[in-house]
Image (cartoon, grey):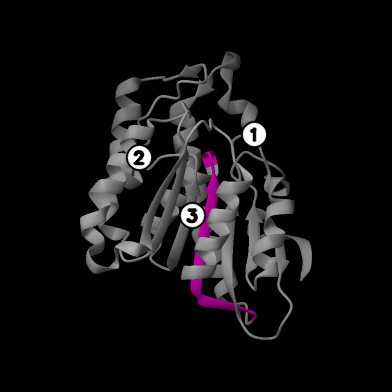
Amino acid sequence: MTGPMKTLIGEVPTLVTRPVGDAPAPLVLLSHGFMGCKENWLEESDEPAGKGFVAAAMDNRLHGERAGVGFDSLLPEGKLDLPGLRRVMQETAADMSKLIDHFSRDEAVDAGRVAVAGVSMGDFVSFAALVNDARIKVATPIIASPYWGDIPGDSDVDLGSEADLTDFSLRNEPAGRKESIPPRALLMQIGGEDRHYDGARVELFYEQLRPLYGDESERLGLIVHPGVGHELTAEMWANAVAWLEKYL
């Protein structure tokens, strides 16, 4: 394993950890949570890289070493600008496609085997990237939702125009494009006590997806972790890595 090596891919600061070996390796893109940065993945990225994957952790828009304003712009008067955050998530998902473009030109990467993994805000990003880019074959989003109209119950939020938020969510949320996901391998994980989104809707989304997978239902998974709030646990990450190993 080599790295992590810091590199600027277009406008996206990225930490890349590579496995040892000469054969082209699958690619795993990692997206962090709100107020985080790519360095949050330093410990976790070692595991997929150790199993033969290229792990690329990105700075989300307005975060880390991204040029321009920071995430404080999403906290006017201390309240979370939820419509603004949803737009940032959509833009960051588009950045994921740019990273895939870049790594597709890398001879050390198997461009036919691409996965995304995210936590919290990065989980929302991973959902969006999955429905936007057919090159992504595997996804393991953790502690978030494919529904963008959910109002976090654990944060003080500024909804701006609630009608605008509803309109943007309905036009862009991954839940509205569920037919584009199968047969790609999707493992969702949520905390049973997480109030950052509506967990019951995530469970409903899973039930709606199941018939679309037909005879390949093993490629779809949902794990609800009892007693867990809005946090990434070691068990969640172990499940995610096992999913990558199985399907990537």
Q: What SS does tag 3 mark?
A: strand
- The CA distance from mark 3 to mark 2 is 14 Å
The crowd level at tag 3 (other Cα within 10 Å; few <14, some 14-19, many 20+) is many
Upstream in the sequence, badge 2 or badge 1? 1
x%, y% of residue 199? 38, 34
Disc 3 residue type? Thr
| Quadrant where the N terminus is found in the figure | bottom right
Residue placed under numbered mark 2 in the picture: 202
- Compare residues 240 and 135 and report the one nearer the observer: 240
Residue placed under numbered mark 1 in the picture: 35
Q: What SS does tag 1 mark?
A: loop
Q: Residue furthest front?
A: 226
Q: Is residue 114 magenta?
A: yes
Q: Is residue 209 left or right of residue 144?
A: left
Instruction: Say the numbered circle drawn on residue 76.
Output: none
Q: Residue at x 40, y 24 (%)?
A: 151
Disc 1 residue type? Met
x%, y% of residue 248? 50, 71
Q: Is residue 26 magenta?
A: no
Q: Which residues are magenta?
A: 108-121
Q: Residue at x 29, y 23 (%)?
A: 163
Disc 2 residue type? Val
Q: Is residue 47 left or right of residue 104?
A: right
The crowd level at tag 1 (other Cα within 10 Å; few <14, some 14-19, many 20+) is few
Q: Is residue 234 above or below residue 198?
A: below
State whether residue 184 appears in this view.
yes
Q: What SS does tag 2 mark?
A: helix
Observer-side mark, 1 or 3, equals 3
